């Protein structure tokens, strides 16, 4: 796993469930099609949609939008996990994503603090 022997059998490795949900194709129903997709897929009326295909790394990017922090933790817990190899395979920079998630959390905490301060200022102004 990750170019190294783990000494484990397949059923001894806890593969994160989200890894089984990679979609290289997806049925797009007519009602969900964009105008451009309707132009590009002339038979969408008779088929009531079309089968959209994704490039491999595009499919990974789509899947990655849905992963949770628990999913990432499970991924990193795989035997011999190597972020560089994972990025080569998927195009996903796990380290960068973790940094972005931490920054997002920090910004949300600051925003909440500002909201609370604004509410306090509003209360003070109403008392005047």
Image (cartoon, grey):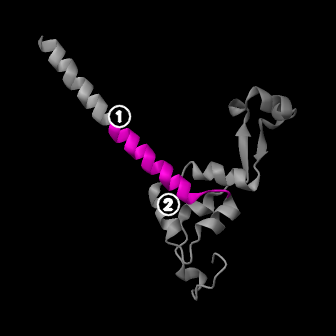
Q: Is residue 11 above or below residue 87?
A: below
Considering depth in this image, is 19 or 31 the residue closer to the camera?
A: 19
Q: Earlier in the sequence, mark 2 or mark 1?
A: 2
- Label 2: which secondary element: helix
Query: Which quarter of the rendering shows the N terminus?
Result: bottom right
* Percent x, y of residue 114: 30, 31
- Spatial distance from mark 2 to mark 1, Cα to Cα? 26 Å
Of the numbered discs in the image, which one, if any, rests on residue 71?
A: 2
Q: Residue at x 73, y 54 (%)?
A: 24
Highlighted range, magenta: 91-110
Q: Main secondary structure of the magenta part?
A: helix
* Percent x, y of residue 34: 73, 29
Location of mark 1 (residue): 111
Residue at the limit of the structure toward the right, as seen here: 42
When asked about the image quadrant of residue 13, the answer is: bottom right
* Percent x, y of residue 53: 77, 48
Q: Are marks 2 and 1 in contact (CB under 8 Å)?
A: no
Specify few, some or many for label 1: CA neighbours under 10 Å numbering under 14, 14-19, or 20 or more: few
Q: Residue at x 55, y 49 (%)?
A: 66
């Amino acid at each position: 796993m990750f170019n190294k022997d783990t000494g484990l059998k397949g059923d001894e490795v806890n593969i994160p469930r989200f890894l089984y949900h990679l979609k290289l194709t997806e049925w797009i129903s007519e009602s969900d099609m964009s105008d451009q997709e309707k132009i590009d897929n002339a038979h969408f009326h008779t088929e009531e949609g079309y089968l959209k295909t994704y490039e491999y790394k595009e499919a990974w990017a789509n899947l990655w939008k849905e992963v949770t922090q628990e999913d990432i933790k499970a991924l990193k817990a795989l035997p011999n996990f190597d972020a560089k190899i994972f990025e080569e395979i998927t195009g996903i920079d796990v380290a960068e994503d973790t940094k972005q998630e931490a920054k997002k959390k920090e910004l949300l905490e600051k925003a909440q603090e500002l909201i609370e301060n604004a509410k306090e200022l509003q209360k003070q102004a109403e008392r005047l």
